[in-house]
Image (tube, rainbow, N blue to C red):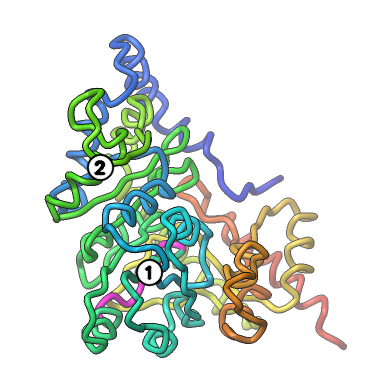
């Protein structure tokens, strides 16, 4: 029997009555764009994170792009981004004619390497994008200390696109930076039935600019105050997200339960697998469960033959991407990230996954390695 990497139909089935009713309500109202459901979701998601302003958008990438645009930076200003990361932050920097500056990662938490971060800050540095990768909060206090030590005015931006509901020192991530961004791509812990994103901030001046930029720079229809784009969340997606938000904490708790089973079974197996590290003050919501394994590609193929689907997040770091060759980075510049991209493997974790399937997955991984131990 196949164990899918994620099962979106199972999640839909669990909330079918609620979500079907919410979608039908939007259809009946014919209020499809920037309607009542969008307004209500913005209020509810802001309340969930305890942040004053939530501005919904077309995607997490748009949230990063609009966020950087609102800072009124100059062409060539530098934005620091972890190299082991999804490409969206770098795309947003380039879209705004800014220079992405990559930093290595900490192999223990996939967050920023503080030593490398400190080296990369210079007079051109204007913002640092902290990425709460795979649902694991990064070390925000330490990063703030690095910024303070530099003596420079540097914006702190949280990319929480994979960390809906994760907590740092008891507070939900997304509430620490000058602004934060979220994605509602269908596979996220809080996912829509299509694309979606949001930008959140306690800064009312920034919030006003975000709202202008997302809709052609217009406060009043047909009258543009600043340059803007079209990036709106539609009402059906907002309605779906309102339903799902009520279940998010329960779903995250299930992810944590399943992650703890992985920890238990891998610890019992004695095989050389590195599982995500657990930190007392950082509560992960396990958007992904990423192990580090020797013979990663062989293991992935083996699991696929056994009907267990897995993925590689990510096969290349940003500095290794052809599109960023012009930045002049070379092999060996980011040793931690380069090593991780050869070892990382994401195995199934989602709220609808049965507990016994975790045992089955670990058993198959054990069998792969035990079969390769020489007699």
Q: Circle 2 — which element?
A: strand
Categorize mark 1 by other alpha carbons within 10 Å: few (<14), some (14-19), many (20+).
some
140 is higher (above) or lower (below) than 8: below
Q: Residue at x 34, y 71 (%)?
A: 128
Q: Circle 1 — which element?
A: loop
How far apart, in angstroms, are the residues tagged by discs 1 and 2? 25 Å
Q: Is residue 176 left or right of residue 205?
A: right
Instruction: Please report contact status of discs 1 and 2: CB closer than 8 Å, yes or no.
Output: no
Task: Pick the residue in front: 320 or 3.
Answer: 320
The verdict on residue 139 being magenta is yes
247 is higher (above) or lower (below) than 301: above
Q: Residue at x 39, y 31 (%)?
A: 15
The answer to whether residue 119 is visible is yes
- Residue 10 percent coordinates (x, y): 51, 36
75 is higher (above) or lower (below) than 143: above
Q: Residue at x 24, y 51 (%)?
A: 200
Q: Is residue 296 left or right of residue 30?
A: right
Q: Quadrant of residue 269?
A: bottom right
The answer to whether residue 268 is visible is no
Q: Residue at x 27, y 52 (%)?
A: 70
Residue occupied by mark 1: 77
Which disc, if any, is residue 55?
A: 2
Image quarter of the C terminus:
bottom right
2 is higher (above) or lower (below) than 180: above
State which tag comes first along the sequence, 1 or 2: 2
Task: Pick the residue in front: 238 or 2.
Answer: 238
Categorize mark 2 by other alpha carbons within 10 Å: few (<14), some (14-19), many (20+).
many
Q: Which residues are magenta?
A: 134-141
- Residue 165 percent coordinates (x, y): 30, 56
């Amino acid at each position: 029997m196949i164990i899918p990497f994620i099962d979106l139909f199972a999640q839909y089935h669990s909330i079918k009555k609620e979500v079907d009713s919410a979608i039908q309500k939007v259809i009946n109202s014919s209020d499809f764009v920037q309607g009542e459901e969008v307004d209500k979701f913005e209020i509810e998601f802001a309340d969930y994170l305890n942040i004053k302003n939530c501005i919904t958008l077309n995607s997490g990438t748009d949230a990063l792009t609009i966020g950087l645009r609102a800072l009124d930076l100059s062409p060539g200003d530098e934005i620091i981004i972890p190299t082991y990361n999804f490409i969206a932050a770098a795309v947003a920097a380039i879209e705004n004619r800014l220079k992405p500056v990559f930093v290595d990662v900490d192999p223990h938490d996939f967050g920023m390497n503080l030593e490398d971060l400190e080296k990369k800050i210079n007079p051109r540095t204007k913002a640092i994008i902290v990425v709460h990768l795979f649902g694991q909060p990064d070390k925000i206090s330490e990063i703030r200390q690095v910024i303070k030590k530099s003596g420079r005015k540097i914006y702190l931006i949280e990319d929480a696109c994979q960390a809906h509901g994760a907590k740092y020192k008891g507070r939900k991530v997304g509430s620490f930076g000058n602004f934060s961004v979220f994605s509602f791509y269908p596979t996220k812990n809080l996912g829509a039935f299509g694309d979606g994103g949001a930008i959140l901030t306690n800064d009312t001046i920034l919030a006003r600019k975000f709202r202008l930029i997302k809709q052609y720079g217009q406060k009043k229809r047909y009258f543009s105050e600043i340059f803007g784009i079209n990036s709106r969340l539609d009402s059906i997606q907002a309605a779906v997200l309102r339903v799902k938000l009520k279940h998010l904490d329960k779903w995250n708790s299930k992810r944590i339960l399943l992650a703890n089973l992985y920890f238990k079974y891998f610890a019992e197996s004695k095989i050389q697998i590195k599982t995500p590290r657990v930190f007392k003050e950082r509560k992960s919501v396990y958007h992904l469960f990423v192990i580090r394994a020797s013979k990663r590609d062989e293991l992935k193929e083996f699991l696929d033959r056994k009907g267990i689907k897995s993925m590689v997040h990510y096969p290349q770091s940003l500095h290794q991407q052809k599109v960023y060759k012009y930045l002049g980075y070379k092999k060996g510049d980011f040793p931690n990230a380069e090593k991780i991209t050869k070892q990382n493997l994401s195995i199934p974790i989602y709220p609808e996954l049965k507990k016994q399937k975790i045992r089955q997955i670990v058993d198959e991984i054990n069998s792969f390695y035990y079969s390769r131990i020489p007699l």
